[in-house]
Image (tube, helix red, strand yellow):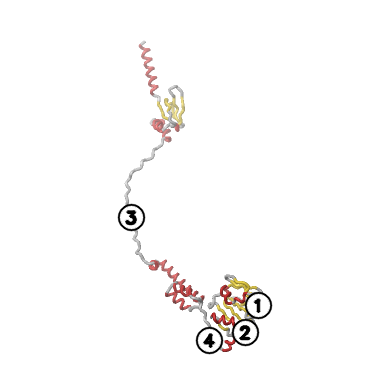
């Protein structure tokens, strides 16, 4: 009897110790699982539950607390570590040191011209602008029929302002001196049927008498040269308005236009049409229509067709 008592007591102690060895692990879904660890592998843990059954629990199903608990086992540490989340490091409250910054000194304030002259690039830019100012004065002197030396000299003294002054002035035309006309030449402008156009040309100024090429009894040709006149649409509509009609007035029906360009000379009896940059003339020979750009015209003569 005594031996049997000690055997039963030993078995009871062994059973109790087996029961106390069972571990409880929290799962990620909030539940828990209890049992003895039988083995570890790459996929998870094999447990023997208290009801003497076996179950496999994969690593992702364990909660972080359970993984840390299993990580204390040396055999499972290398398998559990990849699934344990590492908390982010706490930020260090380091004091921010503010250092003084050396700032470059600003240049002293000065005018625009002085600023341009202080650098080589600005000086070259001023020279180019000044040269363009002189060249513009030269072109304006030609277009406005002004003395080239006077216009360029004023542009050199007053850049930009000088060319603007002469550009605002009208084109200057010079009439021939009265003493240069002989009584015969004065009578030429009094030919019946042509006195009105010639008188208008003299009143407008800039028209001079062709010294040669006119026959007796016909008026001298009126000559309009580039530089003294600006050939454009308004010039033709103002000076030669009678040449636009198909039926000419009796005072102008015998007059023709001699247009001289750098390449040819045309004798026109009518202006068929006119545009912004060119005019179309009906020439005497053949009656063809010829287009002449305003920029190509060097001189225009208004004369009698037989002169």
Q: Which residue is mark 3?
A: 101
Say which mark, if any, is on residue 284. Answer: 1
Q: Choose top left, top right, bottom left or bottom right for residue 44.
A: top left
Seen in the picture, residue 12 relative to 231 is either above or below; the reply is above
Q: Is residue 234 left or right of residue 35?
A: right
Q: Position of residue 203 (x, y in %)?
A: 54, 81
Say which mark, if any, is on residue 178. Answer: 4
Residue lying at the far right of the rendered structure: 286
Which residue occupies 34% across, 57% down?
103
- Residue 118 in view, yes or no: no
Q: Position of residue 210 (x, y in %)?
A: 58, 83
Q: Nearer the viewer, residue 267 or 222?
A: 222
Residue lying at the far bottom of the rendered structure: 183
Q: Give the Cα distance between marks 3 and 4.
A: 84 Å
Neighbours of disc 4 within 10 Å: few (<14), some (14-19), many (20+): few
Seen in the picture, residue 13 relative to 61 is either above or below; the reply is above
- Residue 85 in view, yes or no: yes
């Amino acid at each position: 009897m005594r031996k049997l008592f000690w055997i039963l007591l030993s078995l009871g102690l062994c059973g109790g110790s087996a029961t106390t060895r069972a571990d409880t692990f929290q799962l990620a879904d909030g539940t828990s699982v209890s049992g003895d660890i039988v083995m570890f592998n790459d996929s998870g843990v094999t447990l023997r539950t208290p009801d003497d059954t076996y179950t496999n629990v994969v690593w992702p199903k364990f909660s972080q607390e359970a993984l840390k608990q299993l990580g204390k086992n040396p055999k499972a540490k290398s398998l559990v570590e990849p699934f344990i989340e590492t908390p982010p490091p706490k930020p260090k409250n380091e004091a921010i040191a503010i250092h003084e910054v050396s700032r470059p000194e600003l240049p002293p304030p000065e005018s625009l011209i002085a600023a341009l002259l202080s650098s080589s690039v600005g000086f070259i830019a001023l020279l180019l602008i000044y040269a363009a100012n002189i060249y513009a004065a030269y072109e304006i002197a030609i277009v406005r029929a002004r003395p080239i030396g006077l216009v360029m000299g004023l542009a050199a003294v007053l850049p930009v302002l000088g060319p603007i002054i002469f550009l605002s002035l009208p084109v200057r035309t010079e009439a021939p001196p009265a003493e240069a006309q002989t009584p015969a030449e004065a009578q030429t402008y009094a030919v019946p049927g042509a006195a009105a156009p010639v008188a208008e040309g003299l009143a407008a100024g800039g028209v001079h008498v062709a010294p040669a090429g006119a026959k007796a009894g016909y008026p001298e040709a009126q000559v309009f040269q580039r530089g003294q006149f600006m050939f454009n649409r308004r010039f033709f509509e103002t000076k030669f308005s009678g040449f636009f009609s198909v039926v000419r007035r009796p005072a102008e029906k015998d007059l023709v236009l001699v247009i001289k360009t750098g390449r040819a000379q045309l004798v026109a009896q009518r202006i068929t049409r006119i545009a912004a940059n060119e005019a179309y003339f009906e020439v005497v020979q053949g009656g063809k229509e010829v287009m002449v750009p305003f920029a190509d015209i060097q001189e225009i003569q208004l004369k009698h067709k037989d002169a």
